[in-house]
């Protein structure tokens, strides 16, 4: 944010694109900065996430941007489209905030924006939120997810102390989507490829890898995030019921759901929560 009206607008931070990089054929890194970086207040969680604000096609907002005014004066159809993304890294000293975007061609909102982003483009966001960082009291760590969880997994690995014992299980489309992680920990990484999923069932592939892994002795700390059906309906019951993992040592949630936009995914989650009450 560079002007006072934005500061009064629910914590909206306005950043500019500094540079972009294709990390893999389907993941784009966007490095953001500019004057507004001074307004970003990181919470230091490994899974720190933000809500990105994208204007609907054909909509231009008055400057300086004020979210409160937009939502007061414009119809809902012209309000910003929100997309939730993990902050891959933040450096106040460098004045840089990094977000990695999964790209599926012209599908969606955020991926196509990232693919077309160029230096000087503006991106507005709200946040961050987050709840997880690796516990220094754990004897070992298990990090599980798909592409959507890679930024948080990478951030967590960078925070692990030297000698920490970490098992990582990551599911991606194919070997071209593998990434390297910087860490001082002792890490064993299993990469799963959907193209090799038995019976064409990637949900069973990821869940099965967790079921088959033998827990070491001692206290584990778990981070399991990704597609909602596999994470919440397959892996979560296994950890809580079958392995008796205490909830205090488990960070688990669905980042997305197959066949849903973020809006319909929020509706689905609300329905699931209502059904439990």
Image (tube, rainbow, N blue to C red):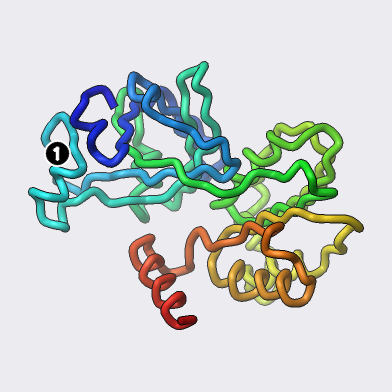
The outermost residue toward the right is 217
Q: Taking 4 as reference, is 237 above or below it?
A: below
Residue 191 seen in render: no
In the picture of the structure, the residue carrying the numbered disc 1 is: 61
Q: Position of residue 111 (x, y in %)?
A: 40, 46
Where in the figure is residue 140, as x and y percent of width and height?
Answer: 82, 49
Camera-side residue of 227 and 222: 222
Question: Does the image show residue 271?
Answer: yes
Instruction: Give SS at disc 1.
Output: loop
| Nearest the eye: 10 or 259 | 10
Left or right of 92 in this view: 171: right
Residue drawn where x is 67% and y is 70% of the image: 235
State left or right for residue 48 relative to residue 203. Answer: left
Figure quadrant of the N terminus? top left
Q: In the displayed image of the protein, which residue is found farthest to the top?
A: 93
* Image-based side of 223 in relation to 31, left or right: right
Q: Residue at x 70, y 44 (%)?
A: 134
Residue at image x 35%, y 41%? 126
Rendered position, 156 above or below 270: above
Position of residue 146 relative to residue 188, above or below, is below
Residue 247 occupies quadrant: bottom right
Residue at image coords 52%, 29%: 90
């Amino acid at each position: 944010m560079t002007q006072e009206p934005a500061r009064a607008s629910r914590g909206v931070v306005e950043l500019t694109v500094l540079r972009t990089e294709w990390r893999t054929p389907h993941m784009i890194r966007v490095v953001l900065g500019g004057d507004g970086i001074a307004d970003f207040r990181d919470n230091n969680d490994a899974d720190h996430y933000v809500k990105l604000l994208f204007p609907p096609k054909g909509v231009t907002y008055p400057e300086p941007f004020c979210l409160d005014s937009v939502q007061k004066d414009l119809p809902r159809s012209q309000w910003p489209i929100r997309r939730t993304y993990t902050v891959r890294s933040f450096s106040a000293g460098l004045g840089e905030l990094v977000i990695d975007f999964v790209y599926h061609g012209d599908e969606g909102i955020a991926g196509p924006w990232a693919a077309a982003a160029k230096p000087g483009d503006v991106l507005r966001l709200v946040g961050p939120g987050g709840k997880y960082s690796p516990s220094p009291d754990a004897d070992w760590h298990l990090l599980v997810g798909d592409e959507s969880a890679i930024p948080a997994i990478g951030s967590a690995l960078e925070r692990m102390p030297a000698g920490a014992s970490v098992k990582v299980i990551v599911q991606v489309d194919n070997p071209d989507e593998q990434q390297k992680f910087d860490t001082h920990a002792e890490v064993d990484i299993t990469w799963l490829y959907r193209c090799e999923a038995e019976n064409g069932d990637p949900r069973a592939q990821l869940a099965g890898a967790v079921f088959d892994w033998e827990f070491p002795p001692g206290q584990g700390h778990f981070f399991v995030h990704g597609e909602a059906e596999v994470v919440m309906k397959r892996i979560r019951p296994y950890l809580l019921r079958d392995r008796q993992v205490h909830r205090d040592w488990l960070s688990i949630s669905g980042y997305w759901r197959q066949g849903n936009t973020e809006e319909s995914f929020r509706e689905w989650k609300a329905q699931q929560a209502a059904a439990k009450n």
